[in-house]
Image (cartoon, helix red, strand yellow):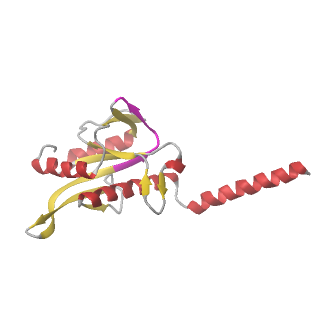
Amino acid sequence: MYGLFLIKIVLRKIGDIAKMIIASGMTENHQKEALSRAYIHAIAAKAGANVNVNTYDYGIDVEFNEIKNIDGERLETGSTFKCQLKATKNWSMNGDEVVYTLKAETYNRLVKIRNHATLPLVLILLCLPPNQDEWHEMCEEFLKIRRCCYWLHWDYGLETTNTSGINIHFPRSQIFTPEALVMLFQQFRRGTYR
């Protein structure tokens, strides 16, 4: 009798968990994508830049556009660059680098885009904690997305024959911040990066 009671409690708990998973609606990948977009929107807002999210995914997720006050009028300057966003809980730190394994197919796609692009291409990686419950936190005082994004100017020119993945090394110094966004606009405007 007591065993049957425990089984009913366990089944009820499993049912409650299943309802929560179903009620959440989004897949884990879609949640990661939404968090990465929220992160870059917050950075762009703080930097005073415009960010456009592509409706369809053909290898480029977003475009950043610089806004300047020109003769008392806020205008897009034409300084712009394109980005591929990635969000993952599968990353590691190796000294002063963050290492992420990019699928070979995605790597080759970015190489093709880069080789045909007229605008700079940046890879932005949101590094999330392994535990999904720690990805974000909110209260009346703040909204926090954990951990952070790193950026890498994509200048890889050769496709890989590897079929699984390529380790991409992001310098830990290249955290995607409002200051980094402004610096990227300046660098690309001056032609420091192609």
| Percent of width and height locating residue 188 | 15, 49
In the rendered structure, the answer to whether residue 163 lies left or right of residue 108 reads right
Above or below for 62 versus 91: below
Give the residue displayed 15% in from the left and 50% down from the top: 186
Give the residue displayed 33% in from the left and 31% down from the top: 96
| Magenta-tinted stretch | 85-95
Query: Is 72 contained in the magenta span?
Result: no
| Percent of width and height locating residue 87 | 41, 48
Position of the C terminus by quadrant: top left
Above or below for 86 versus 159: below
Q: Is residue 126 visible?
A: no
Compare residues 164 and 78 and report the one nearer the observer: 78
In the rendered structure, the answer to whether residue 12 lies left or right of residue 146 reads right
Give the residue displayed 92% in from the left and 51% down from the top: 1
| Percent of width and height locating residue 44 | 28, 58
Give the residue displayed 13% in from the left and 43% down from the top: 192
In the rendered structure, the answer to whether residue 110 lies left or right of residue 32 reads left
